[in-house]
Amino acid sequence: MAFVRRKGNSLYLVHNVRRGGKVRQLHLARLDDKGRITDRVVREVSKKHPFVELNWRALREQASQKINLADPNSREVQRLISTLRSLHLELADLFPPVVQIFQNHPPWRRSCLYNCGF
């Protein structure tokens, strides 16, 4: 039985294996911070653990249901609020003419201005 497990700030795809009467967790892959099971993860796990049969469709559905945006106290909502606050404070610190420069130029030029320190 495979499932997604959080350990600290990381998400892992793990599989329970019984060895010598004890259940051990086999760490199949470390997932990104959103817990997505990408095609790359599927390929790597299939290559690294060819004898482990997994229901990838069910695992992807389970991983996609991990985010709970309806609960204001959930970890994901709190992380989103923190990111938005940081972005708001960073935008508030910009000098108004710099904001106008970014608005009046095409995207390729915005990245050039940003990388030059303006």
Image (cartoon, rainbow, N blue to C red):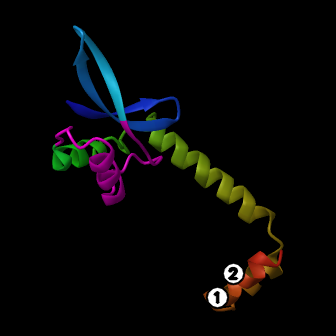
**Quadrant in which the C terminus is drawn:** bottom right
Front position in the image: 10 or 21:
21
Report the residue marked by disc 1. 108
Q: Amino acid at mark 2?
A: Ser
**Quadrant in which the N terminus is drawn:** top left
> Which residue is at a point 43% across and 38% down the rendered structure image?
11
Front position in the image: 97 or 6:
6
Q: Determine whether 23 is above or below 47 in the image.
A: above
Q: Judge the density around disc 1: few (<14), some (14-19), many (≥20) Cα neighbours within 10 Å.
A: few
Q: Residue furthest top?
A: 21
Q: Determine whether 115 is above or below 48 in the image.
A: below
> Which residue is at a point 27% across and 15% down the rendered structure image?
23
Front position in the image: 98 or 11:
11
Query: Which quadrant of the structure image shows residue 110?
Result: bottom right
> Which residue is at a point 62% across and 86% down the rendered structure image?
107
> Which residue is at a point 18% across and 41% down the rendered structure image?
54
| Chain part drawn in magenta | 28-54
Q: Is residue 4 magenta?
A: no
Query: Which quadrant of the structure image shows residue 89?
Result: bottom right
Query: Which quadrant of the structure image shows residue 113?
Result: bottom right
User: What is the CA distance from the residue labelled 1 to the residue labelled 2?
Assistant: 5 Å
